Image: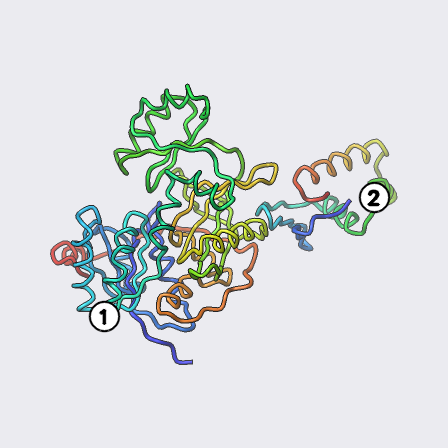
Amino acid sequence: MKVNKNIAVSESGFLFDSMSGDSYSLNPIAAEILRLIRDTKNPEEIKQELLKKYDVSQSAIDKSVDEYLFTLKKLNIIK
Amino acid sequence: MKKRKITVAVTGLNNVDNPGPGIPVIRGLMESEYFEPRIIGLAYENLEPGIYMHDHVYKTYQIPYPTLGSDTLIKRIEYINEKEKIDVLIPNFDAELFTFMKAADRLGEIGIHTFLPSLQQFEERHKTVLPEFGRKYGLKVPGSKAIFSADDFKKSRNEDDFDYPLLVKGKYYDAVVAYNEDQAKSAFHKISSKWGLPIIVQKFVKGTEVNVVALGDGNGNTIGAVPMRKQYITDKGKAWAGIALGDTNLLTITRKLIKRTKWRGGMELEMIKTEDNDYFLIEINPRLPAWVYLAVGAGQNLPEALAKLALGLTVKPFNKYEVGKIFIRYSYDLIVDLSEFEKLSLYSEL
């Protein structure tokens, strides 16, 4: 999993896709997941990191992270 | 550095909701680090806002529409030149370009420099022959055909190559997406009453519209190119806001096209990018577009470069621009004294 090179994310979580001109406001956890992807973590490692950090069930993490990664792929933000 | 003083005549002062490129071109020239321009406005109508923007336009002359005859228009330009000594003329309307191209030598003899596409370049990219243009230069182009009667929509359907929705386009301007025959016929009558015949029917390609403003030096080199995506579109389909893209595919397509055609002058490529990352050319406008000031803001002063090329100066190609720069238009009420309107109406000069 890799973040496409045309994607820029500011510290405040503003994501800009220079190929399409699309932009998105990421909430803190969405931005954190993108940072983890940039740190070459795979989906399982990302989920484990979040489970350690937040009081949330495994099933909730699985569902949310999988959906988010699916969306990122669909929007050509990651590949 | 002392700036070089030049007088530039510019058309397209209709800075309205469907704006001409005149004022953005002038803004680029005014921000030139090389020129100190004195702008002469050339207006067809007496309510074109640029006429009254005295901080942009030094003096404006009304000129006759090209439909009244090329000679009439060029004689008027010769008269204006006697008074103003024009160095460079930048026409900004599709409908007048043919006249100015044909008269380029005549204008050159009296010291007026232009930098326009050749007649061949101008003719072969017409909407009516765009599919042939695409085949010749290796670009994907949606199928299209020129029609002369609203009844031809029936024939189009029978041939089964144009299913709805389809695009109904004017010879020079306007485009409407029609979802059925009634809408197509209505668009045919509306657009043909304004721009004449033929009407171009183009296959609808689903995707995102992306545009490029570019400048070719006539030898196959791209002097500058900036891609843009419209972010806010008016009900006339015009960009009210847009963003500079870093789409390298679009830049490659543009550079290849300019190299193959040896394009001379400004151009706007209108393309559709599909979900599969395919690019379809839907139109080429043979001039700088009304959003050219975005290129200036992003670091490529294309109007200045065009004026330099017109004067025979060497221009180094731009190799970068700032991706993510945004333009946002606004409307502004100019307050004009009746005496100004009167002067222009009576004497055709202001």
* Above or below for B301 versus B35: above
- Does residue B334 appear anywhere in the picture? no
At 36% from the left and 53% from the top, the residue drawn is: B21
- From mark 2 to mark 1, how far is it between C-alphas? 69 Å
The numbered mark at residue A46 is: none
User: Which residue is disc 2 drawn over?
Assistant: A42
Query: x and y percent of residue B300 in the render?
Result: 48, 62
Horizontal side of B282 relative to B340 (left or right) equals right
User: Which residue is disc 1 drawn over?
Assistant: B85
SS at mark 1 in the image: loop
The quadrant of the image that shows the N terminus of chain B is bottom left
- Relative to the observer, which residue lies in front, B310 or B25? B310
| Scheme of image coloration | rainbow
Type of residue at label 1? Lys
* Above or below for B326 versus A73: below
Query: x and y percent of residue B124 in the render?
Result: 38, 45
Query: x and y percent of residue B59 in the render?
Result: 23, 64
SS at mark 2 in the image: loop
